[in-house]
Image (cartoon, rainbow, N blue to C red):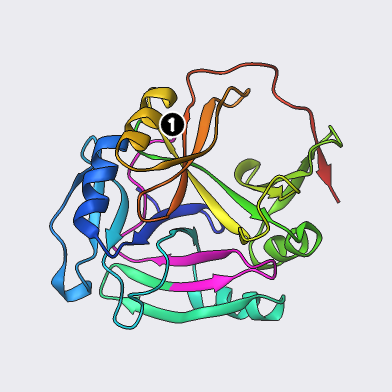
Amino acid sequence: MAAQPEGTPCWADAMFADIEGAKSFYGDVLGWTFGEGSAEFGNYTQAFADGKAAAAVSPPMPGEEESPSAWCLYLASPDAAATAAKVRENGGEVLVEPMQVGEFGTMALARDPGGAVFGIWQAGTHEGFETEMGAPGGFCWGEVFTRDPKTVDAFYPAVFPYTVRKFDDESMDFRMFNVQEQTVLGRMAMGDDFPPEVPSYLNVYFAVPDCDAAVAKATERGGVLRFGPMNSPFGRFAAISDPQGASFAVIDVTTTEGEMPATSPVA
């Protein structure tokens, strides 16, 4: 599999204080199985959907034990150091400087000017998701939820080679970031319906064969339903927080309703 085009979501991971609890929860909800943790890399443990690499979980790094659990979505870069420099030049913050992870690749963590955290991944032997888009258990979509859409809309296309489209329906402030004519990431403005204590964040969607069944399993296992399930032209989806507080979304792309929204390019 070739490394993903620059700016394409290519990997997701999360740190959990109770890693065995996380493996049990996501194994039930998303059908994941797990490889052996790598002691050399802090017991970083890959998750698999139908035998294909889907994401990873790990214990907190030393000194990060009190940090809240959260999913991190990584965007592909041919040069992590150059991307990190662009983050700084355009008002973002580099939280973890580019560092090599063995032969697997080079990673960095950054925060956009609106406060959402994302990862940067320069592939080595690990090129990212092996799952097919929409396949159960695999990554399916990512959205930047932000309280500062104007600033964020300028930031991402300055850091990555995105072209931008918007919904023609002015009632929804939504943007789509495209790479090579393919939409790879969304941007949703956070309105008054979001509690003020919820910061900007990058929401990660995983595909499931049945959204309602996934929600039922998640809540049965101690997760909290935050939104939905709701039908859309893109699929039936719901937003969930897992028992350790990490937010994610599930979507059944086979259950759709309504026409695809009309969009226009943003100059």
Q: Decide whether residue 109 is among the magenta residues.
A: yes
Q: Position of residue 161 (x, y in %)?
A: 66, 59
Q: Quadrant of residue 39?
A: bottom left
Residue 60 vs 265, above or below: the answer is: below
Badge count: 1
Residue 130 vs 259, above or below: the answer is: below
Specify few, some or many for label 1: CA neighbours under 10 Å numbering under 14, 14-19, or 20 or more. Answer: some
Residue 175 vs 149, above or below: the answer is: above
Q: Position of residue 237 (x, y in %)?
A: 52, 30
Q: Quadrant of residue 57?
A: bottom left
Image point 87% across, 37% down: which residue?
Answer: 170
Q: Position of residue 69 (x, y in %)?
A: 40, 62
Residue 177 vs 28, above or below: the answer is: below
Foreground of the two, 227 or 100: 227
Question: Magenta stretch mostly in which secondary structure?
Answer: loop
Disc 1 residue type (three-letter) = Gly
* Image position of 206 (left or right of 233): left
Tell me the residue that label 1 is attached to: 134
Q: Quadrant of residue 42?
A: bottom left
Q: Is residue 4 visible?
A: no
Q: Position of residue 266 (x, y in %)?
A: 83, 47
Image point 68% across, 58% down: which residue?
Answer: 196
* Image position of 51 (left or right of 220): left
Q: Decide whether residue 152 is among the magenta residues.
A: no
Q: Secondary structure at mark 1?
A: loop
Foreground of the two, 65 or 9: 65
Q: Is residue 46 visible?
A: yes
* Image position of 96 (left or right of 40): right
* Image position of 197 (left or right of 204): right
Image point 29% across, 67% down: which residue?
Answer: 104
Tell me which segment is drawn in magenta.
Answer: 108-135
